[in-house]
Amino acid sequence: MKYYSTNKKAPMATLEKAVVKGLAEDKGLYMPENIKPLPKEFFDNIDKMSFQEIAYTVADAFFGEDVDADALKKIVYDTLAFDCPVVPVCDNIYTLELFHGPTLAFKDVGARFMARLLQYFLKKENNGSEVNVLVATSGDTGSAVANGFLGVEGIKVYVLYPKGKVSPIQECQFTTLGRNITAIEVDGVFDDCQALVKTAFMDADLNAHMKLTSANSINVARFLPQAFYYFYAYAQMKKQGKADQMVMCVPSGNFGNICAALFGHRMGLPIKRFVAANNANDIFYNYLQTGEYHPQPSKATLANAMDVGDPSNFARIYDLYKGDHKVITSLISGATYKDEQIKETMRQCHAETGYVLDPHGACGYQALKDLLQPGEAGVFCETAHPAKFKEKVDDILSTDIAIPERLQAFMKGTKQSVAMSKDFADFKAFLMKQ
Ligand SMILES: *Cc1c(COP(=O)(O)O)cnc(C)c1O
Protein backbone atom coordinates (compact mmCIF):
# COMPACT_ATOMS: atom_id res chain seq x y z
CA MET A 1 0.00 0.00 0.00
CA LYS A 2 1.22 3.48 -0.83
CA TYR A 3 0.70 6.56 1.30
CA TYR A 4 0.08 10.08 -0.03
CA SER A 5 0.51 13.41 1.71
CA THR A 6 -2.54 15.51 2.63
CA ASN A 7 -0.71 18.49 1.09
CA LYS A 8 -0.38 16.55 -2.23
CA LYS A 9 3.06 18.03 -2.93
CA ALA A 10 5.25 15.13 -1.80
CA PRO A 11 5.94 11.81 -3.55
CA MET A 12 3.94 8.74 -2.52
CA ALA A 13 5.62 6.79 0.28
CA THR A 14 5.83 3.16 1.29
CA LEU A 15 4.48 2.20 4.72
CA GLU A 16 8.07 1.88 5.90
CA LYS A 17 8.92 5.42 4.85
CA ALA A 18 5.70 6.82 6.30
CA VAL A 19 6.45 5.18 9.66
CA VAL A 20 10.15 6.04 9.76
CA LYS A 21 9.71 9.66 8.61
CA GLY A 22 6.39 10.46 10.28
CA LEU A 23 5.67 13.63 8.29
CA ALA A 24 5.84 13.98 4.49
CA GLU A 25 8.39 16.31 2.84
CA ASP A 26 5.70 18.91 2.19
CA LYS A 27 4.76 18.83 5.93
CA GLY A 28 1.52 17.02 5.08
CA LEU A 29 0.21 13.97 6.92
CA TYR A 30 0.36 10.57 5.29
CA MET A 31 -2.91 8.90 4.23
CA PRO A 32 -3.33 5.33 2.95
CA GLU A 33 -4.07 5.32 -0.78
CA ASN A 34 -7.10 3.14 -0.25
CA ILE A 35 -9.18 2.17 2.71
CA LYS A 36 -10.49 -1.34 2.16
CA PRO A 37 -14.09 -2.08 3.11
CA LEU A 38 -14.38 -5.22 5.23
CA PRO A 39 -16.85 -7.94 4.17
CA LYS A 40 -20.40 -8.17 5.51
CA GLU A 41 -19.66 -11.55 7.14
CA PHE A 42 -17.04 -9.91 9.32
CA PHE A 43 -19.59 -7.48 10.74
CA ASP A 44 -22.25 -10.22 11.02
CA ASN A 45 -19.94 -12.33 13.18
CA ILE A 46 -17.94 -9.66 14.94
CA ASP A 47 -19.73 -10.20 18.26
CA LYS A 48 -18.36 -13.74 18.37
CA MET A 49 -14.73 -12.68 17.91
CA SER A 50 -12.12 -11.67 20.50
CA PHE A 51 -10.59 -8.18 20.65
CA GLN A 52 -7.34 -9.55 19.23
CA GLU A 53 -9.08 -11.41 16.37
CA ILE A 54 -11.06 -8.31 15.44
CA ALA A 55 -7.96 -6.11 15.61
CA TYR A 56 -5.93 -8.47 13.44
CA THR A 57 -8.61 -8.38 10.72
CA VAL A 58 -8.52 -4.57 10.77
CA ALA A 59 -4.71 -4.42 10.92
CA ASP A 60 -4.45 -6.82 7.98
CA ALA A 61 -6.60 -4.47 5.85
CA PHE A 62 -4.20 -1.59 6.51
CA PHE A 63 -0.81 -3.25 6.86
CA GLY A 64 -1.20 -6.76 5.42
CA GLU A 65 0.42 -5.91 2.08
CA ASP A 66 3.55 -4.57 3.75
CA VAL A 67 4.11 -6.71 6.83
CA ASP A 68 4.45 -10.52 6.98
CA ALA A 69 1.29 -12.12 8.36
CA ASP A 70 3.05 -13.83 11.28
CA ALA A 71 4.88 -10.69 12.31
CA LEU A 72 1.74 -8.58 12.06
CA LYS A 73 -0.22 -11.04 14.13
CA LYS A 74 2.49 -10.97 16.78
CA ILE A 75 2.52 -7.16 16.82
CA VAL A 76 -1.27 -7.02 17.22
CA TYR A 77 -1.45 -9.70 19.91
CA ASP A 78 1.47 -8.18 21.82
CA THR A 79 -0.07 -4.70 21.67
CA LEU A 80 -3.54 -5.72 22.81
CA ALA A 81 -2.83 -7.81 25.86
CA PHE A 82 -5.59 -6.07 27.84
CA ASP A 83 -9.32 -5.49 27.59
CA CYS A 84 -11.35 -2.34 26.74
CA PRO A 85 -14.77 -3.09 28.18
CA VAL A 86 -17.95 -1.21 27.30
CA VAL A 87 -19.63 -0.36 30.62
CA PRO A 88 -23.18 0.99 31.08
CA VAL A 89 -23.29 4.36 32.87
CA CYS A 90 -26.94 5.41 32.65
CA ASP A 91 -29.97 5.04 30.33
CA ASN A 92 -28.67 4.49 26.79
CA ILE A 93 -25.22 5.86 27.65
CA TYR A 94 -22.25 3.53 27.83
CA THR A 95 -18.54 4.14 28.20
CA LEU A 96 -15.73 2.44 26.33
CA GLU A 97 -12.96 2.29 28.93
CA LEU A 98 -9.74 2.84 27.04
CA PHE A 99 -7.57 3.08 30.13
CA HIS A 100 -6.61 -0.49 30.92
CA GLY A 101 -3.24 -0.43 29.14
CA PRO A 102 0.23 -0.34 30.74
CA THR A 103 0.17 3.43 31.49
CA LEU A 104 -3.64 3.54 31.78
CA ALA A 105 -3.89 5.60 28.58
CA PHE A 106 -5.59 4.86 25.27
CA LYS A 107 -2.37 6.02 23.64
CA ASP A 108 -0.67 2.84 24.88
CA VAL A 109 -2.00 0.85 21.92
CA GLY A 110 -0.79 3.25 19.25
CA ALA A 111 2.58 3.78 20.93
CA ARG A 112 3.26 0.07 21.38
CA PHE A 113 2.10 -0.77 17.87
CA MET A 114 4.31 1.92 16.37
CA ALA A 115 7.33 0.78 18.40
CA ARG A 116 6.86 -2.81 17.22
CA LEU A 117 6.31 -1.85 13.58
CA LEU A 118 9.34 0.45 13.56
CA GLN A 119 11.42 -2.36 15.06
CA TYR A 120 10.13 -4.75 12.37
CA PHE A 121 11.29 -2.41 9.59
CA LEU A 122 14.67 -1.74 11.26
CA LYS A 123 15.31 -5.48 11.59
CA LYS A 124 14.31 -6.06 7.97
CA GLU A 125 16.78 -3.43 6.79
CA ASN A 126 19.32 -5.04 9.08
CA ASN A 127 21.88 -2.28 8.60
CA GLY A 128 22.23 -1.62 12.32
CA SER A 129 20.95 1.90 11.96
CA GLU A 130 19.31 3.46 14.97
CA VAL A 131 16.19 5.63 15.05
CA ASN A 132 15.65 8.46 17.50
CA VAL A 133 12.11 9.26 18.50
CA LEU A 134 11.43 12.80 19.69
CA VAL A 135 8.19 13.44 21.50
CA ALA A 136 6.83 16.57 23.17
CA THR A 137 4.26 15.93 25.85
CA SER A 138 1.90 17.71 28.19
CA GLY A 139 1.60 14.44 30.12
CA ASP A 140 -0.16 11.47 28.56
CA THR A 141 1.67 11.06 25.26
CA GLY A 142 5.08 10.97 26.93
CA SER A 143 4.21 8.16 29.30
CA ALA A 144 2.50 6.03 26.64
CA VAL A 145 5.32 6.48 24.12
CA ALA A 146 8.09 5.94 26.68
CA ASN A 147 6.50 2.73 27.94
CA GLY A 148 5.58 1.54 24.46
CA PHE A 149 9.18 1.90 23.28
CA LEU A 150 10.88 0.80 26.51
CA GLY A 151 13.54 -1.80 25.80
CA VAL A 152 12.90 -1.86 22.03
CA GLU A 153 16.27 -2.42 20.42
CA GLY A 154 17.57 0.08 17.89
CA ILE A 155 15.32 2.90 19.06
CA LYS A 156 16.09 5.75 21.45
CA VAL A 157 13.34 7.97 22.80
CA TYR A 158 13.62 11.57 24.00
CA VAL A 159 10.59 12.85 25.89
CA LEU A 160 10.42 16.64 26.24
CA TYR A 161 8.07 17.96 28.92
CA PRO A 162 7.43 21.36 30.51
CA LYS A 163 8.96 21.76 33.96
CA GLY A 164 6.32 21.92 36.71
CA LYS A 165 3.40 21.58 34.27
CA VAL A 166 2.95 17.81 34.31
CA SER A 167 1.15 16.00 37.14
CA PRO A 168 3.51 14.08 39.49
CA ILE A 169 1.86 10.76 38.54
CA GLN A 170 2.35 11.46 34.83
CA GLU A 171 5.93 12.64 35.30
CA CYS A 172 7.07 9.49 37.08
CA GLN A 173 5.72 7.35 34.22
CA PHE A 174 8.45 8.56 31.86
CA THR A 175 11.22 9.86 34.14
CA THR A 176 11.81 6.64 36.09
CA LEU A 177 12.33 4.21 33.21
CA GLY A 178 15.98 4.72 32.12
CA ARG A 179 17.37 2.31 29.48
CA ASN A 180 16.54 3.69 25.98
CA ILE A 181 14.29 6.44 27.37
CA THR A 182 15.64 9.94 28.16
CA ALA A 183 13.36 12.49 29.84
CA ILE A 184 14.15 16.14 29.11
CA GLU A 185 12.72 18.72 31.48
CA VAL A 186 12.31 21.96 29.56
CA ASP A 187 12.24 25.28 31.36
CA GLY A 188 9.16 26.49 29.49
CA VAL A 189 5.61 25.52 28.55
CA PHE A 190 4.29 22.70 26.32
CA ASP A 191 4.38 24.88 23.21
CA ASP A 192 8.14 25.44 23.80
CA CYS A 193 8.68 21.66 23.91
CA GLN A 194 6.74 21.21 20.70
CA ALA A 195 8.68 24.03 19.02
CA LEU A 196 12.01 22.39 19.98
CA VAL A 197 10.88 19.09 18.45
CA LYS A 198 9.56 20.69 15.26
CA THR A 199 12.73 22.75 14.79
CA ALA A 200 14.86 19.64 15.31
CA PHE A 201 13.03 17.80 12.51
CA MET A 202 13.88 20.63 10.11
CA ASP A 203 17.51 21.12 11.20
CA ALA A 204 19.91 19.92 8.49
CA ASP A 205 22.89 19.26 10.83
CA LEU A 206 20.82 17.15 13.19
CA ASN A 207 19.25 15.15 10.37
CA ALA A 208 22.69 14.43 8.96
CA HIS A 209 23.87 13.36 12.40
CA MET A 210 20.96 11.08 13.38
CA LYS A 211 17.72 9.51 12.10
CA LEU A 212 14.84 11.39 13.70
CA THR A 213 11.16 10.56 13.83
CA SER A 214 8.05 11.61 15.72
CA ALA A 215 5.71 9.50 17.81
CA ASN A 216 2.84 11.97 17.89
CA SER A 217 -0.44 11.01 16.23
CA ILE A 218 0.80 12.44 12.93
CA ASN A 219 2.48 9.03 12.53
CA VAL A 220 0.24 6.53 10.68
CA ALA A 221 1.52 3.67 12.82
CA ARG A 222 0.40 5.46 15.95
CA PHE A 223 -3.01 6.74 15.00
CA LEU A 224 -4.42 3.96 12.77
CA PRO A 225 -4.31 1.16 15.39
CA GLN A 226 -6.75 3.21 17.45
CA ALA A 227 -9.39 2.09 14.93
CA PHE A 228 -9.32 -1.33 16.66
CA TYR A 229 -11.16 0.15 19.63
CA TYR A 230 -14.21 1.15 17.65
CA PHE A 231 -14.72 -2.22 16.00
CA TYR A 232 -14.48 -3.84 19.41
CA ALA A 233 -16.91 -1.32 20.94
CA TYR A 234 -19.37 -2.12 18.15
CA ALA A 235 -18.92 -5.85 18.76
CA GLN A 236 -19.71 -5.45 22.45
CA MET A 237 -22.79 -3.33 21.74
CA LYS A 238 -23.98 -5.82 19.13
CA LYS A 239 -23.66 -8.65 21.65
CA GLN A 240 -26.13 -6.75 23.85
CA GLY A 241 -28.46 -6.00 20.94
CA LYS A 242 -27.71 -2.27 21.23
CA ALA A 243 -25.72 -1.62 18.06
CA ASP A 244 -28.49 -0.67 15.62
CA GLN A 245 -28.38 3.07 16.22
CA MET A 246 -25.01 3.43 17.84
CA VAL A 247 -23.51 6.89 18.32
CA MET A 248 -19.80 7.10 19.11
CA CYS A 249 -18.54 10.09 21.09
CA VAL A 250 -14.80 10.79 21.33
CA PRO A 251 -13.22 13.40 23.64
CA SER A 252 -10.80 15.02 21.21
CA GLY A 253 -7.65 17.13 21.25
CA ASN A 254 -5.36 16.40 18.32
CA PHE A 255 -8.20 14.39 16.69
CA GLY A 256 -6.12 11.24 16.09
CA ASN A 257 -8.46 8.98 18.00
CA ILE A 258 -11.69 10.12 16.33
CA CYS A 259 -9.94 10.13 12.97
CA ALA A 260 -9.13 6.42 13.44
CA ALA A 261 -12.81 5.84 14.28
CA LEU A 262 -13.77 7.57 11.02
CA PHE A 263 -11.38 5.33 9.10
CA GLY A 264 -13.26 2.41 10.68
CA HIS A 265 -16.54 3.89 9.47
CA ARG A 266 -15.09 4.13 5.95
CA MET A 267 -14.26 0.41 6.19
CA GLY A 268 -17.94 -0.30 6.78
CA LEU A 269 -18.22 -0.20 10.56
CA PRO A 270 -21.97 0.46 11.05
CA ILE A 271 -21.81 3.34 13.51
CA LYS A 272 -24.69 5.76 12.85
CA ARG A 273 -22.86 8.99 13.66
CA PHE A 274 -20.04 10.54 15.68
CA VAL A 275 -19.65 13.28 18.25
CA ALA A 276 -16.35 15.10 18.81
CA ALA A 277 -16.36 16.43 22.38
CA ASN A 278 -14.01 19.33 23.10
CA ASN A 279 -13.02 21.28 26.18
CA ALA A 280 -12.73 25.09 25.84
CA ASN A 281 -10.43 24.58 22.84
CA ASP A 282 -13.29 24.83 20.37
CA ILE A 283 -11.60 25.13 16.97
CA PHE A 284 -13.24 22.02 15.49
CA TYR A 285 -16.60 22.91 17.02
CA ASN A 286 -16.40 26.30 15.30
CA TYR A 287 -15.42 24.64 12.04
CA LEU A 288 -18.58 22.52 12.19
CA GLN A 289 -20.73 25.61 12.84
CA THR A 290 -19.16 27.91 10.24
CA GLY A 291 -17.20 25.82 7.73
CA GLU A 292 -14.10 27.85 8.58
CA TYR A 293 -11.03 26.52 10.32
CA HIS A 294 -9.13 29.04 12.43
CA PRO A 295 -6.30 27.67 14.60
CA GLN A 296 -5.90 29.37 17.99
CA PRO A 297 -3.23 29.30 20.70
CA SER A 298 -4.15 26.45 23.06
CA LYS A 299 -6.04 27.25 26.29
CA ALA A 300 -5.11 25.48 29.51
CA THR A 301 -8.06 23.46 30.90
CA LEU A 302 -8.86 20.71 33.40
CA ALA A 303 -8.82 18.20 30.53
CA ASN A 304 -5.23 19.09 29.61
CA ALA A 305 -4.56 16.24 27.16
CA MET A 306 -7.14 17.94 24.92
CA ASP A 307 -5.57 21.42 25.09
CA VAL A 308 -4.83 21.68 21.38
CA GLY A 309 -5.37 24.86 19.38
CA ASP A 310 -4.50 23.49 15.94
CA PRO A 311 -5.38 19.78 15.80
CA SER A 312 -2.97 18.01 13.41
CA ASN A 313 -5.44 15.36 12.32
CA PHE A 314 -7.95 17.91 11.07
CA ALA A 315 -6.01 17.65 7.79
CA ARG A 316 -6.79 13.92 7.62
CA ILE A 317 -10.50 14.34 8.37
CA TYR A 318 -10.74 17.11 5.80
CA ASP A 319 -9.00 14.92 3.23
CA LEU A 320 -11.12 11.86 4.03
CA TYR A 321 -14.28 13.78 3.09
CA LYS A 322 -12.63 15.88 0.36
CA GLY A 323 -13.27 19.04 2.36
CA ASP A 324 -17.05 18.67 1.98
CA HIS A 325 -18.45 20.51 5.00
CA LYS A 326 -21.97 19.13 4.40
CA VAL A 327 -20.78 15.55 4.45
CA ILE A 328 -18.65 16.18 7.53
CA THR A 329 -21.47 17.84 9.49
CA SER A 330 -23.94 15.13 8.49
CA LEU A 331 -21.69 12.51 10.11
CA ILE A 332 -19.98 14.41 12.96
CA SER A 333 -21.46 16.74 15.59
CA GLY A 334 -19.45 18.81 18.02
CA ALA A 335 -19.68 19.96 21.61
CA THR A 336 -17.49 22.23 23.75
CA TYR A 337 -17.31 22.55 27.54
CA LYS A 338 -15.56 25.01 29.83
CA ASP A 339 -13.96 23.88 33.09
CA GLU A 340 -16.95 24.85 35.23
CA GLN A 341 -19.23 22.63 33.12
CA ILE A 342 -16.73 19.77 33.27
CA LYS A 343 -16.74 19.94 37.07
CA GLU A 344 -20.54 20.10 37.20
CA THR A 345 -20.81 17.09 34.88
CA MET A 346 -18.37 15.07 36.99
CA ARG A 347 -20.37 15.85 40.14
CA GLN A 348 -23.74 15.11 38.55
CA CYS A 349 -22.64 11.85 36.97
CA HIS A 350 -21.07 10.70 40.23
CA ALA A 351 -24.17 11.60 42.27
CA GLU A 352 -26.65 10.06 39.83
CA THR A 353 -24.81 6.96 38.64
CA GLY A 354 -21.83 6.41 40.96
CA TYR A 355 -19.47 6.45 37.97
CA VAL A 356 -16.25 8.45 38.46
CA LEU A 357 -15.44 10.37 35.29
CA ASP A 358 -12.07 11.96 34.62
CA PRO A 359 -12.19 15.50 33.14
CA HIS A 360 -11.65 14.23 29.55
CA GLY A 361 -14.34 11.55 29.72
CA ALA A 362 -16.66 14.12 31.31
CA CYS A 363 -16.71 16.09 28.04
CA GLY A 364 -17.75 12.92 26.20
CA TYR A 365 -20.45 11.98 28.69
CA GLN A 366 -21.96 15.47 28.68
CA ALA A 367 -21.93 15.64 24.88
CA LEU A 368 -24.05 12.46 24.73
CA LYS A 369 -26.37 13.80 27.43
CA ASP A 370 -26.87 16.90 25.29
CA LEU A 371 -26.99 15.40 21.79
CA LEU A 372 -28.33 11.83 21.95
CA GLN A 373 -31.66 11.39 20.11
CA PRO A 374 -34.51 9.03 21.13
CA GLY A 375 -33.81 5.47 20.00
CA GLU A 376 -30.04 5.92 19.85
CA ALA A 377 -27.49 4.24 22.10
CA GLY A 378 -24.43 6.35 22.86
CA VAL A 379 -20.92 5.19 23.71
CA PHE A 380 -18.31 7.68 24.87
CA CYS A 381 -14.63 6.95 25.34
CA GLU A 382 -13.25 7.23 28.85
CA THR A 383 -9.75 8.18 27.69
CA ALA A 384 -7.94 8.33 31.04
CA HIS A 385 -8.19 6.56 34.38
CA PRO A 386 -9.46 9.13 36.91
CA ALA A 387 -6.56 8.30 39.26
CA LYS A 388 -4.20 9.95 36.79
CA PHE A 389 -5.85 13.21 37.74
CA LYS A 390 -6.38 12.19 41.34
CA GLU A 391 -5.85 15.60 42.95
CA LYS A 392 -8.32 17.33 40.64
CA VAL A 393 -10.88 14.52 40.74
CA ASP A 394 -10.80 14.19 44.54
CA ASP A 395 -11.08 17.93 44.89
CA ILE A 396 -14.11 18.13 42.58
CA LEU A 397 -15.93 15.05 43.89
CA SER A 398 -14.73 15.10 47.52
CA THR A 399 -13.53 11.53 47.10
CA ASP A 400 -10.29 9.69 47.84
CA ILE A 401 -10.02 7.42 44.81
CA ALA A 402 -7.62 4.50 44.90
CA ILE A 403 -4.45 4.58 42.79
CA PRO A 404 -4.15 1.37 40.74
CA GLU A 405 -1.10 -0.75 41.59
CA ARG A 406 0.39 -0.24 38.15
CA LEU A 407 0.55 3.51 38.76
CA GLN A 408 1.93 3.09 42.27
CA ALA A 409 4.77 0.99 40.91
CA PHE A 410 5.94 3.93 38.73
CA MET A 411 5.82 6.23 41.74
CA LYS A 412 8.40 4.11 43.57
CA GLY A 413 11.08 4.64 40.90
CA THR A 414 13.79 7.32 40.94
CA LYS A 415 13.30 10.36 38.76
CA GLN A 416 16.04 10.94 36.17
CA SER A 417 15.86 13.83 33.74
CA VAL A 418 18.05 16.21 31.78
CA ALA A 419 17.42 19.90 32.50
CA MET A 420 17.13 21.98 29.31
CA SER A 421 16.47 25.63 28.47
CA LYS A 422 13.91 26.42 25.78
CA ASP A 423 16.70 27.63 23.44
CA PHE A 424 17.01 25.43 20.39
CA ALA A 425 20.82 25.88 20.39
CA ASP A 426 21.04 24.06 23.76
CA PHE A 427 18.79 21.21 22.63
CA LYS A 428 20.71 20.86 19.39
CA ALA A 429 24.08 20.79 21.19
CA PHE A 430 22.71 18.04 23.47
CA LEU A 431 21.48 15.90 20.56
CA MET A 432 24.71 16.39 18.59
CA LYS A 433 26.57 14.71 21.48
CA GLN A 434 24.34 11.61 21.37
C1 LIG B 1 -4.57 12.25 23.94
C2 LIG B 1 -5.78 12.32 24.81
C3 LIG B 1 -7.02 12.79 24.32
C4 LIG B 1 -7.19 13.35 22.93
O1 LIG B 1 -6.95 12.42 21.92
P1 LIG B 1 -6.64 12.91 20.42
O2 LIG B 1 -6.35 11.69 19.66
O3 LIG B 1 -5.43 13.82 20.55
O4 LIG B 1 -7.83 13.67 19.96
C5 LIG B 1 -8.11 12.76 25.16
N1 LIG B 1 -8.01 12.34 26.43
C6 LIG B 1 -6.85 11.88 26.94
C7 LIG B 1 -6.81 11.44 28.36
C8 LIG B 1 -5.70 11.86 26.15
O5 LIG B 1 -4.55 11.43 26.67
Image: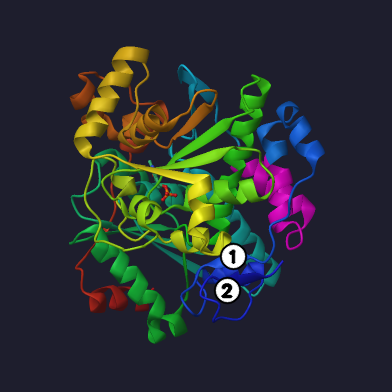
Relative image position of residue 46 (x, y in whole percent): 73, 32
Q: Quadrant of the N terminus?
A: bottom right
| Quarter of the figure with residue 342 | top left
Decide if residue 289 is on the left or right side of residue 8: left
Residue depicted at x 57% and y 31%? 246
Residue depicted at x 30% and y 50%? 282
What residue range appears in magenta? Answer: 55-80
- Separation of disc 2 and disc 1 at Cα? 26 Å
**Label 2 environment density (alpha carbons within 10 Å; few <14, some 14–19, many ≥20):** few
SS for callout 2: loop
Decide if residue 337 is on the left or right side of residue 57: left
Q: Earlier in the sequence, mark 2 or mark 1?
A: 1
Amino acid marked by disc 1:
Met
Asked if the residues shown at circle 2 and circle 1 are in contact, with their CB atoms under 8 angstroms apart, the answer is no
Membership of 341 in magenta stretch: no
Does residue 55 appear anywhere in the picture? yes
Residue depicted at x 40% and y 46%? 252
Membership of 74 in magenta stretch: yes
Q: Nearer the viewer, residue 38 or 159?
A: 38
Residue under pointer 1: 31
Relative image position of residue 387 (x, y in whole percent): 33, 29
Residue depicted at x 43% and y 39%? 103
Chief SS of the magenta region: helix
Residue under pointer 2: 129
Q: Is residue 241 above or below residue 123?
A: above
